[in-house]
Image (cartoon, rainbow, N blue to C red):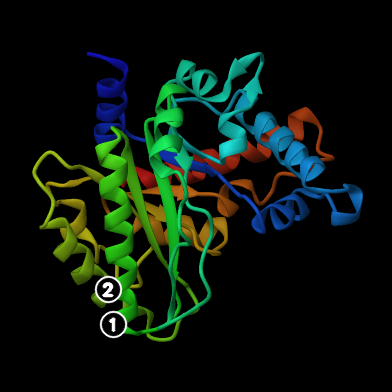
Amino acid sequence: MNKFEKQFQRIQKEKGFIAALDQSGGSTPKALLGYGIEENEYNGEEAMYLLIHEMRVRVMKDPSFTGDKILGVILFEKTMNGFVEDLPVPEFLWKKSIVPFLKVDKGLQKIESGVKLMKEIPNLSERLQDAKSKGIFGTKMRSVIYAKDEAGIIEIVKQQFEVAKVILENGLVPIIEPEVDIKADGKVEIETILREAILSELDKLSSDQKIILKLTIPTEADYYTELIQHENVLRVFALSGGYDLDRAARMLTENHGMIASFSRALLDDLKVDQSTEEFSKELSTAIAEIYKASIT
């Protein structure tokens, strides 16, 4: 069995969750602020990305951050191209049996028809081949639904699947992430439209085209069971969407077959000025709670 097959089997069948360490662009200052670093403490984009990389390295090197509970990690491109202990990040992660994914979207367009579509992704095939050569297994791309607008929701799903087919053609497994804003009016109705739109696109795939879904935890427990069981779906990840760790974990526990792919809920209690022992304790506590919620 080659590496890709081992990683495929691990993501499909094994217990654990996905750590999202892919904050980029406009979300990086907020992530650093949550970590305890104010914007006036660094000057310029290069310094900002160096600090966020140092935070991610601290997380990835922690003794609690292992393949025992963590199946995969979603990386920002600069993180993919970085190093941990003189090893390229994807190689360092796979030594821990953690499958590396790459965030490939380039941000969002302005809101229209109640949704924010992805911006155009330039040179996508070249970037995918570069990622594949560096040991990346799959990709992630995010767009957001803010309102109950059927045309907008259908368009967002259509765009996600169109890009996913390019990713599949390049030999990587796409994570499709049409996030539903947790504060959206009519969230339940949005989830109904979204589920049907995803099922419609899934049914157009050939039997060998496997994708991953990353979805906001639904209001109604087990609402995405049909998606979880679909033959073209490798796994369904849950995003925390701004819920705190306790609430996100509690809701996830009620959704059997979904596993966590948390960012904020994983990292919220980590601070730059914590001692090694304090940092490790907070991280291991979050990992244990998210893992427990992901194995229901």
Q: Position of residue 229 (x, y in %)?
A: 15, 51
- For this rendering, which residue is in front, 163 or 40? 163
Across and down, in percent, residue 115 comes to 43, 76
**Is disc 1 surrounded by few (<14), some (14 to 19) or many (20+) residues within 10 Å?**
some
Residue that badge 1 annotates: 150
Instruction: Report whether residue 254 is seen.
Output: yes
Instruction: Inspect the image, locate mark 2, and give the three-letter code of the amino acid beneath it.
Output: Ile
Please say if 154 is above or below 127: below
**Are the two marked residues, 2 and 1, in contact with CB atoms closer than 8 angstroms?**
yes
Q: Image quadrant of residue 64? A: top right
Q: Residue at x 61, y 23 (%)?
A: 63
Q: Is residue 43 left or right of residue 218?
A: right
Residue 30, relative to residue 149: is it above or below? above
> Which of the two residues, 241 or 210, is positioned nearer the viewer here?
210
Residue in view at x 24 percent, y 66 percent: 223
Residue extending farthest to the right is 40
Name which residue lies at 25% across and 62% down: 222
Secondary structure of the residue carrying numbered label 2: helix
Q: What is the three-letter code of the residue carrying label 1?
A: Glu
Res 186 label: none
Q: Report the label total.
A: 2
Question: In the rendered image, which quarter is residue 18 located in?
Answer: top left
Q: CA distance from mark 2 to mark 1?
A: 6 Å
Q: Quadrant of the N terminus?
A: top left
Q: Is residue 235 visible?
A: no
Determine crowd level at label 2: few under 14, some 14-19, many 20+ residues with C-alpha closer than 10 A. Answer: some
Q: Position of residue 109 (x, y in %)?
A: 51, 69
Q: Position of residue 47 (x, y in %)?
A: 81, 41
Q: Nearer the viewer, residue 262 or 152?
A: 152
Q: Secondary structure at mark 1?
A: helix
Residue wearing tag 2: 154
